[in-house]
Each structure stands twice: as structure tokens, then as C-alpha cells.
Image: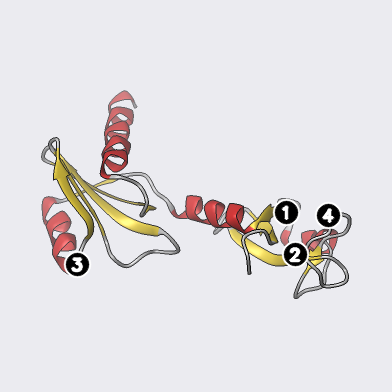
Amino acid sequence: MNTNTNVFFLKDRVIDRAVSVVTDSEGQQLSLAQPIGAYSRKTKAQLEETYGSELRLVTVEEAIDLIDDAWTSEPQVVSESEFFESLGCMPPLKWQSRNGAASFRMSEPYTGTIHAAYVCVGKQHFCFRDRLAKTHEELVAKVKASISNLCIN
């Protein structure tokens, strides 16, 4: 399936998911006039009867980004021992230490490009899920923003 293909996508309370690849009524690539599910052969209106009105038409690339967004999480404080136990659990990915902070990712993804990220800032240790493509600096910034939010609230 190429990334120009479209899918019906459902933003769900449990998990965001692609419901059906879209084709036209002839089984060809998407026709915006009357898109239908490639496998279910149902129209958007028929699929909405099953999945609700939150169903929308997006590209595969957009669906992947939306699903990844659903799997990311906010930083949570973890103990120093959990941080180092995770560091020694598997070979870490992108292990970096500079400017008073250290970070690494677990090598096994949760889903797609989402991995557990561990960050140490000063003497505080954090864990959260985020995209593997995020840089050390972006992970540290996310942790620092969460610390600021905790102080404000």
C-alpha cells in the first residue's frame, strides 16, 4: 500500500485506528465522489453506523501520525534504580549524555515508531513514550516543560 492511499480513520476513546482502506465502487484507488471500504465494501455512512460519526477520511501517512500521537505519553517520574535497570535491560537506542541530562530509548517499540524514552535531568529520572525520531534535546525539553507544569499546578 502506498502512502497516497486513503483510509477511514476512527479517533477512539480506547485506541485510534484505521478502520478500512478506501477505494471507489470499482475497486480502484479513491474516488472522492463515493469512497468505500476496500474490504468491507461499505460506504462512509454505512461504516458510521458501526463506528460512529467520528469516522473521517485521511491519508495513510496521516493515519500513522494520528496513531503514533495516541501512543505518546507525558513524562512520569521513575526511580533511579528503574532508570538504570531499563538502561541495562536491552541495548539502548540513542543513548546520549550532555548539558546535564541523559537520555536513551528502549530498543523494542510500543508500536510503529513509538519507543519508551528515559530521561535524567539533574537527579530526577523520567519515563514516557514518544517517537524515536525525537532528538535528545527535544526529549529533555519535554521533561523540563512537564516539570514546569508540575510546579505551576
The numbered disc on residue 57 is 1
Identity of the residue furthest to the top in this view: 152
- The foreground one among 62 and 44 is 62
Label located before the other in sequence (1 or 2): 2
Which quadrant, please, contains the C terminus?
top left
In percent of width and height, residue 134 lies at: 35, 47
Element assignment for label 3? loop
- Per the image, the residue denoted by label 3 is 91
- Up/down of 67 relative to 140, above or below: below
Cα–Cα span, label 3 and label 4: 47 Å
Cα–Cα span, label 4 and label 1: 10 Å
Rate crowding at label 3 as few (under 14), some (14 to 19) or many (20 or more) other CA atoms within 10 Å. Answer: some
- Per the image, the residue denoted by label 4 is 32
The numbered disc on residue 22 is 2
Cα–Cα span, label 2 and label 4: 10 Å
- The foreground one among 113 and 117 is 113
**Is disc 1 in contact with disc 3, using a CB cutoff of under 8 Å?**
no
Q: Which amino acid, mark 1?
A: Leu
